[in-house]
Amino acid sequence: MVGKGSPRFNIGGSPKLRRFIPTTSATKKKTSPKCSGAKKSGSSPRVVKQRADWNPGLERSLVDILHEFKESGYRGDNGWNSEGWNRMVKEFHVRNKYVSFTKSQIQDKEGQLKRDYKMLKAAKQQSGSTWNEKRNMVEGPPALWENLMVTFPKIKKFNNNKATFPLFDALGELYDGHLAEGTWNCTSLEAPQEEEPNEQLQDVEDGPQGFDLNVVHDVDDEVDDALTERNED
C-alpha cells in the first residue's frame, strides 16, 4: 500500500498534472469588451448634422443672392461653379447671421426651389388648369391634380387652398430668362419671317392690264364740268 504522503498521488505537487486542475481564477469567465458596455477612451464624439430650418424670408434672401450672381461669370450651363457657391454662401451668412447652414444645405435648397418651379410651370401649362395670381399657385379640378400627381408625385404638397409659391416669378426670371407682366411667354428661336405682299392688293393697285387709272380721273372731271354747266343754265 502506498502511504498518504506518497509522491505518486501528490497531484497538487506535480508540475505536469497541475495544469489539468482547474483553478479558481481560471474558472472565472472573462468579460467581453463588447458586452461590458465600457466605451473606449479617446474615441471622438459623433457629430450631429444640424438641420436646416428654412422660412420664406431665408428663401427670398437666397433667391436675391442667386440673382446678384446670375451674370457674375461664376455661372455656366450647369449652374454656378465652386468659387461662385463659396461667395454666395459667405454672402448668405453675412445677411442672415442667426443661421449657420452648410454649403451643401444651401445648394440642396436651391435645387429644391428649381424643381418646384419647373414642376408648377409644367402644371400651369396643362389643359384645364388655372393660375391664381394672388397665391401664385395652380388651381384645377380633382381630376387634374390626380393626373399631375402621377407625373409629379411631390406636387401633392401644393394641393390645398393655403399653398402658395411667391417666388415663382423670381425663379422664372432666374432660370428661364424672360418674364413679361407676370406671365411666361415662350420666346421663339426662329428668325421672324417677312410677310409676303398680297398679290390681290398689288393687282388692284396696278390696275388691269391695258387699263390706265388716270382715264378714270379724266372721265370724272368731264362729268363734273357737265354738271357745272347744267347748274349755270
Image (spheres, helix red, strand yellow):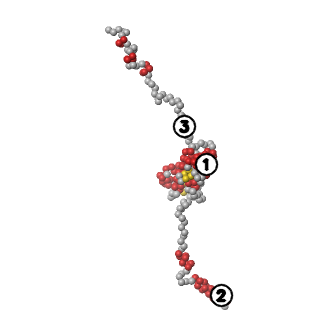
Q: Is residue 16 above or below residue 124?
A: above
Percent position of residue 81, x then y: 55, 49
Q: Is residue 95 above or below residue 32?
A: below
Q: Please identify, in this view, whether the residue under mark 3 or under mark 2 is nearer the observer.
A: 3
Q: Secondary structure at mark 2?
A: helix
Q: Residues within 10 Å of mark 1 (few under 14, many from 20)?
A: some
Q: Secondary structure at mark 1?
A: helix
Instruction: Give the CA distance from mark 3 to mark 2.
Output: 110 Å
Q: Identify which residue is drawn at 57% across, 54% down.
A: 174
Q: Identify which residue is drawn at 56% across, 50% down.
A: 80
| Residue situated in front as seen by the camera: 102 or 135 | 102
Comes first in the chain, label 1 or label 2: 1
Q: Identify which residue is drawn at 60% across, 85% down.
A: 218
Q: Which residue is mark 1?
A: 61
**Of the residues shown, which amino acid type is indicated by label 1?**
Ser
Q: State whether residue 79 appears in this view.
A: yes
Q: Please identify, in this view, whether the residue under mark 1 or under mark 2 is nearer the observer.
A: 1
- Which label sits on residue 228? 2
Q: Please identify, in this view, whether the residue under mark 3 or under mark 1 is nearer the observer.
A: 3
**Of the residues shown, which amino acid type is indicated by label 2?**
Thr
Q: Which residue is mark 3?
A: 47
Instruction: Give the CA distance from mark 3 to mark 1.
Output: 28 Å
Q: Identify which residue is drawn at 54% across, 70% down.
A: 195
The residue lying furthest to the right in this view is: 232
Comes first in the chain, label 3 or label 1: 3
Percent position of residue 144, x then y: 50, 55
